[in-house]
Amino acid sequence: MKADPVTLNVLINAFHAIAEEMGIILLQSAHSTVIREARDCSCALLDAKGRIVAEAEHIPIQMSSLSLPMQACLRKYGGRIGPNEVFVTNDPYIGGQHLQDITIFTPIFAGKALIGFAGSIAHHVDIGGGASGLTLDAREFYEEGLRFTALKLNRRRDFAANGIFRDIVFSNFRAPKATWGDLHAQLAANEVGRRRILELVERHDTETFAFYVEEAMHYSEKLMRAAIARLPDGRYTAEDFIDDGVVDPKPIAVRVAVQVEGEDLHVDFEGSAPQAKDFLNVPIGSTYSSTYSAIKMALSSGDQAIPANDGCYRPISIAAPQGSIVNPAPPAAVRARMCGAYRVFDALLLALQKAIPERIPALGFHANTTSGLSRFKDGEFSIFIEDIGGGWGGYPGGDGADMLDVPLSNCLITPSEAVESDHPFIIMKRYELLPDSGGAGCYRGGLGSVREYEVIEDGVEFFGYSDRHLFAPAGAAGGCPGSTGSFSILRDGAEISLPSKTRQPLRKGDVVRVVVGGGGGFGDPRDRPVERILDDLLEGKISTQHATAHYPQSVGKLHGRGRHGR
Amino acid sequence: MGGTFTDVVAQDGDDLRVVKGLTTPDDQSLSAIDTAARLNEPFSAVRSIIHGTTVATNAILERKGARLGLISTAGFRDVLEFQRQDRGNIWNLFTRKVVPLAPRHLRYEVYERILADGSVHRPLDPESVRVAAQAMMAEGVEAVAVCLLNSYANPSHEARVEAMLAELMPSLYVATSFRTAPHFREYERMSTTAIAAYVGPKVKGYLSRFRGRFAEHGFGGDIYVMCSNGGVLPPESAGLHAAATCHSGPAGGVLATLRVARQKSLKNVVSFDMGGTSTDVCLISGGRANVSTRLRIEGLPITLPMFAIETVGAGGGSIVSVDEGGLLTVGPRSAGANPGPACYGGGGSQPTVTDALALIGLLRAETFFGGRMTLDTLAAEAAYASLARRIGDTPQGVAEKTFTISNAKLASTVRLVSVREGHDPRDYTLVAYGGAGPLHACSVAAELSIKHVVVPRFPGAFSAYGLLCADLKRDFVRTRLTRFSRLGDSELRQWLGELQAENEGEMQAIAGRRHPRWRFTVDLRYAGQASELAVPVPRLSQLKCDTLVRRFHGLHKAKFGFADPQAEIELVNLRLEGSVAGTGLASSSPAAGPATAPRPQSGWLALGGKQKCDFFDRADLPVGTELWGPTVIGESTATTFAPPNWKLTVDPYGNLDLVRV
């Protein structure tokens, strides 16, 4: 068969549209706040070999590496699965993310032939384990929740009212009703993917379908190779550090060497710290997806994106030493993997900055800030959890975005009105931009923010983890660094500072303050046009002191321009 | 009013007349009156004028609205700028956020707090309102959006702020969230309110200018303004609810489609409006157009109910290219109106979809725009030459591929809008209009296994025609987050009755002497879900919660593939639509065709090899004419293509009925 450019175009778009539709269905039918409001979930289509064909563009960290757990499921069962069965997995040690991210794969049969899978992955608020939401003192993943290595379940039998899977969920998870609704939403999304693929096969027949799946991958591979070929050959190294561990309060290094040879790119994490004793370990699936995402974003920002599928990643090889922070051995705990995943991401950006300094932005506040409040009352848990982004790095041609979710994620902030109506023990106090938090530069870093929750009942706990509370994101091309974040409790007129990975009992009337930092600046601050500096002053995004300290060209022109909004 | 052209459709009994003029972007009322004057009828004889304006949409597009302030609850003025912290293209590190309509230094905070249950946690501090008013006066703020947390549950603080501002700054245009969009989720509510205030003064001023201009010329009848929910409002109401006029342009086409559907007794129809830069598609099921409250305008959420029109960036001007991976792609870049496609001779040199149609032979120099515009086929060929060399094909070959790819792209949009609602596109009829719609419609339909296409009269001015079909309409909403199982029939009936009572006065003022018709809907969801499904309430007196619950499960099953009869159901919003049928104008309008038998010109198409094709002028086709594809029907503003195996009939209303055999 010879590839027809018209059919190729039509089918690439169709694959993508199906994955996107799956994503819409999952979001619209999910029950828990973390999925429906924050959108912490992703969907993909895979072929019969478990390779990614198309993805819904939701959460980069959950995407790109889905083929690892998929292929582990296929290996375990020798590729055998029935039409009414699904694979369910959340195992970090077969290529999954942390235990909270449960993946379901639904097989797609055209007649008797298995032609692919519809897969969805979603973050579930609680899957058992030592504590609700976040087990800070976990030393092994066993303490973080239940692990499903690669279950093969019957959709009718095991998900039914007395089914074994329903039983497991309802007897082990703290908020089983919402979780159960979310799992059904995942099944529904997969079902839509399955139906749509079958309609496609009806129009194009199985053989043509399989042929163009290969061609679509081949097409993305060509684009990725062309992008890599534009990088100068060479070896580029960089390092970045997680602030500190829970057990061992010392910085944890992630080191990377990027070797570019023509159209190929090799990434080696040799020299990275050994695996941590606490929950900061980055399972290999997360290391893969952070690496793929960093490279894809670095090479295509400002251009049209390359359709995400298996082909994109073929020119990239990755080596991560066994037993290191980026490829831990079981039973290492992994709940807060995002801290390290962002150091992988940033180390790659820093390395690529050396290859193409004119194309790579300054670092943003690339730290996943998860913040949660849980209450146990009348025999039921009420758990609120959300991810807060930060300021993005300035880039060639523009200021970093003020307050966006971090690049490996794309979660929505929860509306204050949804927080308060779902969790009546919380009152949102404040959600504001943080002036001066973006690094100065010709293109300044985006601003971070401060978000405050007041608890109006006793018996509530705060849990959270973040990073970049010690090391601010670096500027680039002469730009200044962004700023750090912090957790604290306001109690009786005092501010009690908390560590960046924390769990704290609260008292009625406490206010939890979560600060996320701004991004680094790009380019020499002295090159920033005065007009832009004055605009920032007028809008209260920078203070007069900040302007005076970083932008000498504005001195003497500031009179009467700086003002406070309130 | 369009960006380039102004269309006027005049109805006198069964007689319809269409005139086209050029739009004057600085003051659309000028081109409105100039174009209408070309009808050569005295304005004093005109009974009513229905006006579709893009003033609101353009104000947002070009960022030329009011100098806008915002009043929020203390601590939350940046919500407008945070948005929901998500981004469109997830792979782009050079992301720019949409700039908020009110800049940060014009966003003011007042001290107050209402909780989710409507209780007052902290009373409104009037002093903070005064301080904000003073600052707004000093800053020359022209309009303000007031959006306080949880005001959907208790609007008293917003109402108080509104009253204070009316006293302190009588000339300020004030939009409150509890009047504009009283539903939960503060960002979306704030965004909608900000849009309302931002476009308000401009729309209000424009409408009074419009009225004045027509009055000067002797017009003494009623004026109605088209809104995005498919209804019309008198100018005074439209000025108050200015956000409702955003994106009202495409609504006319949907209304006209509804009219055609009713005429032909079609229940399930897709409107397919293809123009120069984009294509608008809307699903009509069971005789009702799909409505959404989750749309965006230029990236800004607007939660007013609007026809759920899906726009895809594929039009006649879409540019065709080959990327690094060797893939032939159509769009998203467009040659737009300037320079336009290469064959228009306006200096365009990039190959576009229109150029492909010229190369295939579907557009012909002799009849293009009724012979009023030139068609440069050589320029089209030149535009395709280098592309053809790169992929080893002839210009005609690439043109044919372009036609196929753009049809597939359009088909996938139609597929998306239907399957997303749980419908099969095969059960639908495509109603095609816009300059390019009727050329692509049959090919798009074939791609979707759709067997029926209708091309109405005046496809190039169809949206304007739709204005004649509009009802007077206002939508009202009230959030009532409640477990549905705790609600009795009588309680729900009482709540809905209250909603009607609250808004009866406003609706009656709009309706004049006529009686408004009321339609209730409740937005339900499984407890915990983010998105609601709108469940129609049959009649208030017969309201049964059980029936609504059953209908909800059914709708959920249709849309998401599952229903959960055990799960708790939550009531989110009560909705009410008040309407008055017709503005007294549109009746059906059968066309009187010429009596002579049509005489085709014959020609060739380069489509699937060279094939012979008949070309007709639409004006020559009497009612009852039957033709077989391939055939091309030209008229002054559009061209219709019936491919092989399609049978074309001119129906009694003058529509072209195309059926795949």
Image: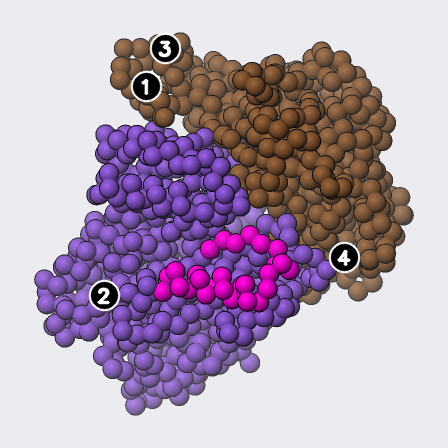
Chain colours: A brown, B purple
Task: Chain letter for mark 4, please.
Answer: A
Rendering quarter of residue B165: top left
Q: Nearer the viewer, residue A76 or A426?
A: A426
* Range covered by the magenta-colored residues: B478-504
Task: Chain letter for mark 1, please.
Answer: A
Residue B322 position, x and y percent, is: 51, 46
Residue on which the image places disc 3: A548
Residue found at x 23% / y 65% = B223
Residue on which the image places disc 4: A108
User: Element under label 1?
Assistant: loop
Rendering quarter of residue B500: bottom left
Residue found at x 70% / y 43% = A122
Q: Mark 3 vs mark 1: same chain?
A: yes
Compared to residue A512, the image places residue A178 above or below, namely: below
- The amino acid type found where label 4 is placed reads Ile
Q: CA distance from mark 3 to mark 1?
A: 11 Å
User: Element under label 3?
Assistant: helix
Residue A216 position, x and y percent, is: 65, 48
**Badge 3: how crowded within 10 Å, few (<14), some, or many (20+)?**
some
Q: How many marks?
A: 4
Q: Residue B449: say if magenta.
A: no
Q: Mark 4 vs mark 2: same chain?
A: no
Residue on which the image places disc 1: A562
Q: Nearer the viewer, residue A556 or B441?
A: A556
Rendering quarter of residue A562: top left
Comes first in the chain, label 1 or label 4: 4
Q: CA distance from mark 4 to mark 2?
A: 57 Å
Residue found at x 58% / y 54% = B482
